[in-house]
Amino acid sequence: MVLIMADRIAVIGCGAAGATAAMQARKFNRKAEITLFNTEPYSQYSRCGLPYTISGKVEDFQDLILTSEDNWSMMKIDAKLETTVTEIDHASKKLKYSGSEGDGELEYDALIFATGAENADPPIKGLDKKRVYGLRTIDDAKSLAAEVDKAKKVVVIGGGLVGVETAEAFHECGADVTIVEFLPHILLAMLDPDMAKIVEAHCEEHGLKLLLNTAAQEITGSDEVKGVVVKNRESEEESEIHADIVVVATGVRPITDLAESIGCEIGPSRGIVTDDKMLTNIEDVYACGDCAEGSEFITNNPMTGGLGTIAVRQARVAGINAAGGNETFPGIVGAKVTKLFGMEIASTGLTADLAKRFEVPMTVGSIKGLTKPPYYKGGKEIKVKTYYHKETGKLVGGQMVSLEDAAMRINVITLGIQHNIDAAELFDFENCYAPAICDTWDPIVSSALAARRRLKI
């Protein structure tokens, strides 16, 4: 295959995906002119760290910025912050932009969309009131951090990762916090109902209030928030919760307007359709990160990633290929982890809900174990579920909940999925052992044994 080196590369977006794409393009092609556009005034920063600025676990907002403006100059990348790309003419390969330093026009050979995602507001009355917030940007986090000493009652609408992490942060600051979740349990993208119940009980023991299977109907108050009207979806009973502030964390949607304007195909997940080279349906145009639709690793179904780990891996491929390389992205496994009140919650691959949607027949290996041998003091309970394709026995997913060591174990399951192992092969996994660290038969091995018996392999 003949590789054509791009002389001029334009990257739209400077989050995890855009910044990584620009840096990888520079590493591959030392001579290319690379221009990076970002609508925000900040250079690349960690969005995943935003909830922790509220509780003070991240002490300074500046600490979240991963690549300074000086670093871009050193890499000879022209980073245009506070600058919006307003128009693209791909036929002539020119774009127009407008920003804090004026308007301009740029010619390019290859274009990378890393435009990310934006908060998807639910159909609730009163979202325009004062002291209603989202949490997607540094400015959002600054607004929330300013509420820490004022807000005594906080309502978080949405029980996904951002919602529960924000709720924990405000609770740690002394607020009375209620999560309103439309679905029957929190963290649906990560956990099955039985695993979610463990987490929910743990959160409630620490003082969080959870209203599950409950729809937020309206944010009340004249100018400013007074409360939230909620409706139990089963009983249809309505009530109002008092709130000083409301945080809306009901998910995000890909930002695709510019890509659509030049004819990029948008897929069923509403992201920009890409192939395994992160190339769109238009020649020399790539997409990566939260705005891009890729393929789920196991079933090849279209899906968006929504994770920083996926964004940087897709961006590496997009950046290198835009610069003339020939890399491929293997697909989205979707390894996720969080920590709430000391409990590690980890998930990878298919959940029961996702398997049902993708019509994958599954067998589960489910066990309750200990992180250390029973005779050694200090071991913690760990609930492990591993999933296997019912017909092939291949590993397709896993979930773990424990007060320690769930996160690192989930990485083993992810590697197993990527290497197409089955229940018998996971059972043969030779884990390390020392009483102070883990048992001779690791809980993930025991879960594989339970599934292997059901699968009869």
Image (tube, helix red, strand yellow):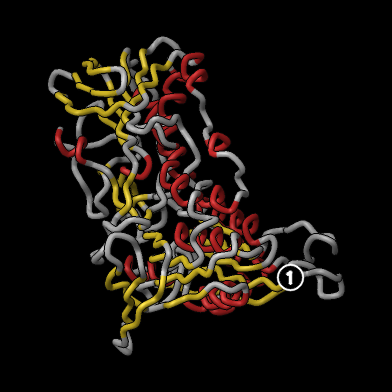
Residue highlighted by disc 1: 380
Q: Say if residue 86 shows up in the picture.
A: yes
Q: Say if residue 451 shows up in the picture.
A: no
- How many numbered circles does the render carry? 1
Q: Where is residue 62 in the image (x, y as percent from the top left)?
A: 54, 34
| 253 or 42: nearer the viewer | 42
Q: Where is residue 426 in the image (x, y as percent from the top left)?
A: 61, 62
Q: Position of residue 107 (x, y in %)?
A: 23, 15
Circle 1 — which element? Answer: loop
State whether residue 335 is above or below residue 86. below
Residue at x 33% of width, y 56% of height: 130
Q: On the picture, is 4 further left or further right than 43? A: left
- What quarter of the picture does the N terminus occupy? top left
Dot 1: within a 10 Å radius of its alpha carbon, few (fewer than 14), some, or many (20 or more) residues?
some
- Considering every residue shown, the one lying at the far front of the view is 222
Residue at x 86% of width, y 74% of height: 375
Q: On the picture, is 280 further left or further right than 193? A: left
Q: Where is residue 287 in the image (x, y as percent from the top left)?
A: 31, 36
| 257 or 128: nearer the viewer | 128
Dot 1 amino acid type = Lys
| 412 or 183: nearer the viewer | 183
Residue at x 27% of width, y 73% of height: 217
Q: On the picture, is 361 further left or further right than 440? A: left
State whether residue 151 is above or below residue 419. below
- Considering every residue shown, the one lying at the far bottom of the view is 235
State whether residue 201 is above or below residue 176. below
